[in-house]
Image (cartoon, grey):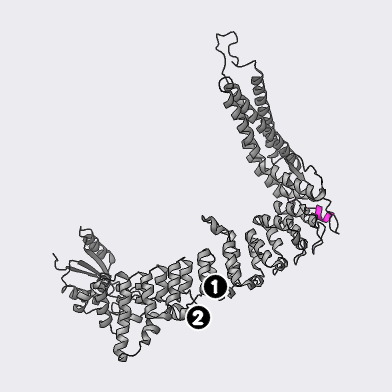
């Protein structure tokens, strides 16, 4: 049962604290129908009080009026001018029943610039909301249908964005009716040109909002009212509805836009000079083929960076998704290239052709397909003079492309091509430390190792220049590549040798290397000392009882395995202890840099041997305890430990074997690369 509305007006022109207390007392009451509204002037409060008394709703409204000292109460608010009571009625669709009894300003706006018609269009499309829209549209002194808020949105934008299909139809009907009344039934140009085609600040019509939420009903209503709407924006300043539908992967809406557009020619424009096909190639084969069937000319358009849809398709291998089919760009590239093969000859703003983009992304299948279709593009160069082989050799993901190019006799003519700096693909691979690409190039005897670049540097010179002075890990890839080039009789350029070999060592940098490494290694050595020392008091099998003939001695003493266990543990303890002492000296600031480096090298070698001895101690201890009762379990533990040890050196062994194979392929015999893993100091 509806009760008479209650209105409380609180005014104060001194302090806001008094008003806060009044509002707090009212809001704290357990009345869920209470709404607090803050007005800007006493005049508005009085008007609201007069109108609210005439209402018979169940709402109890508390209107608080605050005017600060020095504030002009007659000046309208700079933030919002809509009557709060009207805002409440519009949001609930009650304006049709009550607005006629209220002397309210229907042209007021909210803080975002929305009129009452914006609010009604957003909040619902039931019969009460439609009637409210009629009343507001009829009573307003100006046409609110065309009013835009701060975002440039009209009520039609708001209704479409909120998915209010009935409200969209009703707003179009209001505009149509008003135009018919004004023109006597003539064609409604205003409906098309001013309402449906009005763009917001993003240069989007209501059609884009409908597409964005995927509402086919609203899309259909809008296109039925104006088939040319799909052609907007005309100047390409914004995103077209077609581009947006493709981006959202809505095949059904793409087909609908094409079928219902004027002359089946919608706009395909997108941001930054792109078109819908640029987005389609990133959405899969189905969408790409659909766009090509609708408009093949899209393949000719490049974006503001000069990238064609084929450039986008060639870059797909750099995308990692859960859909394995999406990771292969070939199914998308084939139809795009067949639609317009000339895209292969079109570079972007950086001079990159599609074959360069594919090489950069590691798309081997795309590179092979491009070269198979047009063999001459293998020698295309970008703005830096690089071929696709240079680009592939520069990146890890391009190693397969380099390997295939080196194994293809028809591509032998590009192996020694130089870029603008005179660098070949071998120079690039060495400079960036790409071991896989380096090995592929080294194994091909057509690759010339002695071509100098513009600085007079051969591949060997570049390799030497990449190795810094000071502490080095002996099996770093750059050192192994240098060793491989030397073994393959690579020559230096025609420059003084000392220019490549002499490097100034920064003493501060070397001290940081030693200090940082000392702390990390020291923790490991101390832990090994602690563990091996504790083993003496907890040997496998325990100790004999004191009342025994050999009381206090290890119970398993006498066996060969036990003796080996004790020896391995002792060796681990001694080596880690010596390593700890060496690390103490290497970390001391009173010791010279050269001695600190020497002590660190000694500690590193001792620590590696100590870890190996500790692993041996573990295996022997487990075998000693389990062998008598579970032999196969003991054997399995030994095998697993050995496998785990191999993982520690897998990367080192893999690199060495790969380079060794490349050397053998080039010179016909195998050389032993640098020896065991160690840290060296290059002086």
Q: Mark 2, residues whose alpha carbon is within 10 Å: few (<14), some, or many (≥20)?
A: few
Q: Please provide percent x and percent y for residue 497.
A: 85, 54
User: Would residue 475 be found to the left or right of residue 47 on screen?
Assistant: right
Secondary structure type for disc 2: loop
Question: Image quarter for residue 117?
Answer: bottom left
Secondary structure type for disc 1: loop
Q: Quadrant of the N terminus?
A: bottom left
State the residue in front, 484 or 464.
484
Name the residue rendered at 23%, 74% in the picture.
95
Majority secondary structure of the magenta segment? loop
The relative height of residue 422 versus residue 145 in the rendered view (above or below) is: above
Q: Please provide percent x and percent y for residue 120.
A: 29, 73
Q: Which residues are magenta?
A: 492-506
Confirm whether residue 501 shows in the render: yes
Name the residue rendered at 80%, 63% in the picture.
455
Instruction: Name the residue that disc number 2 marks.
Output: 235
Q: Please provide percent x and percent y for residue 244.
A: 46, 70
Instruction: Name the residue that disc number 1 marks.
Output: 274
State the residue in front, 618 or 606.
618
User: Would residue 273 be found to the left or right of residue 2 on screen?
Assistant: right
> Does the magenta-highlighted stretch encompass residue 80?
no
The relative height of residue 253 versus residue 629 in the rendered view (above or below) is: below
State the residue in front, 116 or 477.
477
Earlier in the chain: of badge 1 and badge 2, it is 2
Kindly report the distance in space between the C-alpha atoms of the residues bearing marks 1 and 2.
Answer: 13 Å
> Does the magenta-highlighted stretch encompass residue 504?
yes
Q: Mark 1, residues whose alpha carbon is within 10 Å: few (<14), some, or many (≥20)?
A: many
Confirm whether residue 69 shows in the render: no
The relative height of residue 649 versus residue 179 in the rendered view (above or below) is: above
């Amino acid at each position: 049962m509806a009760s008479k509305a209650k209105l409380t007006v609180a005014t104060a022109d001194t302090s806001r604290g008094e008003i806060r207390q009044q509002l707090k007392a009212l809001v704290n009451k357990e009345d869920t129908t209470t709404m607090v509204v803050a007005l800007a002037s006493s005049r508005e409060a009085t008007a609201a009080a007069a109108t609210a008394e005439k209402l018979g709703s169940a709402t109890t409204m508390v209107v608080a009026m605050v005017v600060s000292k020095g504030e002009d109460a007659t000046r309208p608010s700079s933030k919002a001018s809509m009557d709060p009571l009207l805002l409440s009625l519009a949001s609930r669709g009650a304006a049709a029943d009550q607005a006629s009894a209220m002397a309210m300003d229907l042209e007021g706006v909210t803080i975002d610039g929305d009129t009452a018609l914006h609010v009604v269009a957003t909040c619902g499309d039931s019969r009460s909301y439609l009637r409210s829209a009629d009343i507001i549209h009829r009573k307003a002194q100006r046409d609110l249908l065309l009013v835009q808020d701060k975002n440039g949105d009209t009520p039609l934008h708001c209704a479409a964005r909120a998915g209010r299909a009935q409200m969209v139809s009703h707003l179009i009907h209001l505009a149509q009716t008003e135009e018919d009344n004004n023109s006597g039934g003539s064609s409604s140009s205003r409906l098309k040109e001013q309402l449906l085609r009005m763009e917001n600040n993003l240069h989007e019509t209501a059609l884009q909002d409908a597409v964005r939420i995927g509402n086919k009903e609203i899309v259909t209503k809008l296109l039925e009212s104006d088939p040319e709407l799909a052609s907007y924006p005309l100047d390409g300043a914004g995103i077209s509805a077609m581009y947006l539908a493709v981006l959202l992967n809505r095949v059904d809406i793409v087909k609908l836009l094409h079928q219902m557009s004027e002359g089946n020619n919608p706009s395909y424009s997108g941001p930054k000079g792109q078109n819908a096909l640029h987005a389609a190639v990133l959405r899969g084969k189905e969408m790409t083929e659909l766009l090509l069937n609708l408009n093949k000319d899209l393949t000719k358009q490049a974006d503001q960076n000069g990238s064609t849809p084929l450039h986008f398709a060639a870059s797909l291998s750099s995308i990692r998704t859960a859909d394995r089919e999406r990771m292969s760009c070939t199914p998308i590239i084939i139809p795009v290239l067949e639609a317009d093969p000339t895209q292969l000859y079109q570079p972007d703003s950086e001079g990159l052709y599609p074959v360069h983009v594919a090489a950069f992304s590691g798309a081997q299948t795309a590179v092979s397909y491009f070269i198979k279709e047009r063999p001459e593009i293998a020698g295309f160069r970008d703005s830096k003079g690089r071929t696709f082989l240079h680009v592939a050799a520069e990146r890890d993901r391009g190693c397969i492309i380099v390997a295939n190019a080196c194994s293809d006799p028809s591509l032998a003519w590009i192996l020694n091509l130089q870029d603008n700096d005179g660098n070949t693909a071998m120079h690039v691979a060495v400079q960036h430390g790409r071991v896989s690409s380096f090995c592929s190039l080294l194994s091909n005897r057509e690759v010339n190792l002695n071509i100098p670049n513009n600085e007079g540097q051969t591949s060997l010179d570049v390799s030497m220049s990449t190795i810094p002075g000071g502490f080095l890990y002996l099996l770093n890839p750059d050192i192994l590549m240098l060793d491989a080039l030397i073994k393959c009789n690579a020559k230096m350029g025609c420059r003084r040798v000392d220019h490549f070999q002499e490097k100034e060592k920064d003493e501060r940098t070397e001290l940081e290397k030693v200090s940082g490494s000392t702390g990390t290694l020291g923790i490991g050595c101390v832990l090994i000392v602690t563990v091996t020392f504790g083993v003496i008091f907890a040997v496998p099998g325990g100790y004999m009882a004191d009342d025994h003939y050999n009381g206090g001695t290890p119970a398993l003493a006498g066996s060969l395995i036990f003796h080996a266990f004790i020896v391995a543990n002792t060796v681990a303890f001694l080596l880690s202890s010596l390593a700890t002492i060496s690390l103490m000296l290497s970390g001391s600031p009173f010791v010279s840099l050269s001695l600190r480096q020497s002590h660190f090298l000694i500690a590193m070698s001792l620590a590696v041997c100590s870890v190996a001895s500790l692993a041996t101690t573990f295996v022997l201890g487990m075998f000693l305890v389990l062998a008598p009762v579970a032999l196969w379990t003991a054997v399995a533990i030994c095998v697993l430990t050995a496998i785990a040890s191999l993982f520690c050196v897998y990367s080192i062994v893999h690199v060495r074997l790969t380079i060794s194979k490349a050397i053998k392929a080039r010179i016909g015999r195998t050389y032993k690369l640098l020896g065991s893993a160690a840290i060296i100091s290059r002086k």
